[in-house]
Image: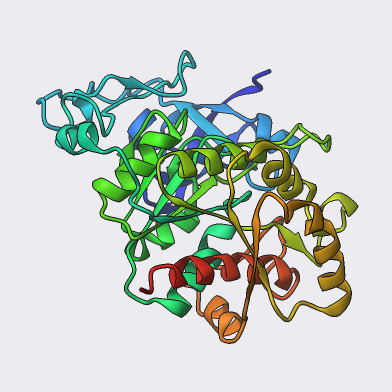
Amino acid sequence: MVRWRSGTVRAIRRRWRGAVELSVTVGDQELRALAYPELVGEPEPGDRVLLNVGALVMGLGTGGYALVVALPDRLPPDPVDDGTTRDAGHLVKARYTPLQPILLGVDEEASPHRAAMAAAESLDGMPVVTADLHSALPAILAGIRAENSTARVAYVMTDGGALPAWFSRTLDGLRDHLAGTVTTGQAFGGDLEASTVHTGLLACRHVLGADLTVVAQGPGNLGTGTPWGFSGVALGEAINAIGTLGGRPIGSLRVSDGDGRPRHRGVSHHSLTAYGKVALLRADLPVPDGLEPTLAAAVDAALAPLAERHHLVRVPIDGLDEALRKSPVGLSTMGRGLDQDHAYFLTAAAAGRHAARLLTP
């Protein structure tokens, strides 16, 4: 279950929005630790910290930090509820865990957006791109910007991966390139909080004023290597939500020429299951032109059974490589960069380009 350690903060290593990376001494070891100040307070050198080191011990790629659970000798003050901030909320996330935060939901009575959300019924045809992995977000955005440099793009972060949006350095780097982030389900820490993907999507359209939205889980997806045992099945449910709310669903395919696991080479079984078995409503599935011939043939063969349910869209790739290389944040998926898994990022960018083209009258 939980592997506990007690340590002392030796130094502050770096910060990004919502998170502080620390060097912590535990016995004769020095560990890399992560604290979320909104949950535990601001750590300082010399502070004693209680740590959960499970992910670090397991060597998880995205979660390989010791996580600060508390600063037991210097607890943060209680939030002040002045009736106008997120502290006025009643939305509990990470429910019944020791660090459950209580937040202001975008559609709660105390929210300044209550009236807009109560009246919201439709996405008004807004294109929405769904993606299996958090790492697809900057690539999708690059594809959108290659086609439309001024579109307002919002992000719905689901709870299949990291729950705190603060964990993502990608989101921190994209702050000036997004209209905002809405954290849904058990996820928290976005610019707006929503209880469901449905309300999150409506908030993107009617509160953030988005022209386009991207839906993906936070970093660190869950997968067991079995046909149904992965958090990305929620993609299919997101397609259903988008269509039900009157949006335009666009499924970004997980395509790889660099993943060493057979189930993820070509079109990942995650995409085939989520879009082919879970999604009940029709979506556009963009396929980039110009893939390496052998890979292209494998992709076409894998997608053939999905053609009856969904619309396979061929997307030109001119300019997409350049757009990807200009991304304001680094591109990485499962430790592979753009040149190590070019098809993955190119396919995500193609989905972004297609979504942007739907905005053109």
- Residue 66, position as x, y percentages in the image: 59, 36
Q: Quadrant of the N terminus?
A: top right
Which residue is rendered at x = 74% and y = 42% of the image?
A: 273
Q: Quadrant of the C terminus?
A: bottom left
User: Which one is nearer the viewer's eye here, 57 or 159?
Assistant: 159
User: Which one is nearer the viewer's eye here, 171 or 209?
Assistant: 209
Q: Is residue 13 left or right of residue 308?
A: left
User: Which one is nearer the viewer's eye here, 269 or 331?
Assistant: 269
Compared to residue 321, the image places residue 31 above or below, namely: above
Which residue is rendered at x = 60% and y = 37% of the image?
A: 234
Q: Where, by quadrant of the figure, is residue 290 drawn?
A: bottom right
On the question of residue 316 being in view, the answer is yes
Which residue is rendered at x = 44% and y = 68% of the image?
A: 358
Which residue is rendered at x = 75% and y = 71% of the image?
A: 340
- Residue 332, position as x, y percentages in the image: 64, 63
- Residue 211, position as x, y percentages in the image: 34, 60
